[in-house]
Image (cartoon, rainbow, N blue to C red):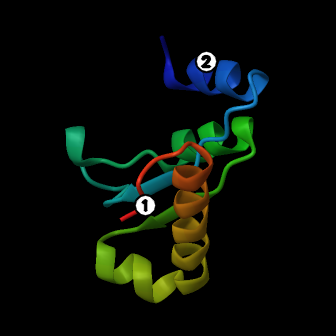
Amino acid sequence: MPPRKAAEIAGQNGITIHVVGLGDPSARGEDKVDYAALSDIAKATGGQVFHGENRVELEKAYPRSIRSLRRILRHSAISHGANSS
């Protein structure tokens, strides 16, 4: 199933998908990050997109997004009964 179709179905079923893209959109082959596709997936489900070329850059460029993603993941783990440690 194509990722965009899966995201559409997820959104219709109340599932939110937040995406994190780490990598270079101008790379070739499997190393290329398709931010347009990631954005479409997040948008279809009411999620957020976080991106950067590497972890350090992501944390520097998007400190609020990282904190927001951590809260989202913590909340998701708690609401689904997972151990958050």
Q: 75 or 21, which lies in front?
A: 75
Q: Nearer the viewer, residue 36 or 59?
A: 59
Residue 63: numbered disc: none
Residue position for label 2? 5
Q: Position of residue 3 (x, y in %)?
A: 51, 24
Instruction: State the residue in front, 34 or 83.
Output: 83
Under circle 1, the secondary element is loop
The residue where tag 1 is placed is 84
- Picture residue at 37% right of the left edge, 49% below the top: 33
Task: Check disc 2 and give the amino acid type.
Answer: Lys
Q: Nearer the viewer, mark 1 or mark 2?
A: 1
Indicate which disc, 1 or 2, sits on the residue closer to the N terminus: 2
Position of residue 43 measured from the top left corner of the image (x, y, whole percent): 71, 43
**Quarter holding residue 24:** bottom left
Q: Residue at x 41, y 54 (%)?
A: 83
Q: Which residue is depicted at the point 52% across and 69% down?
A: 70
The correct choice, above or below, for 60 with respect to 29 in the image is below
Residue 11 to residue 85: above or below: above
Quadrant for residue 37, please give it.
Answer: top right
What is the secondary structure assignment of the residue under circle 2?
helix
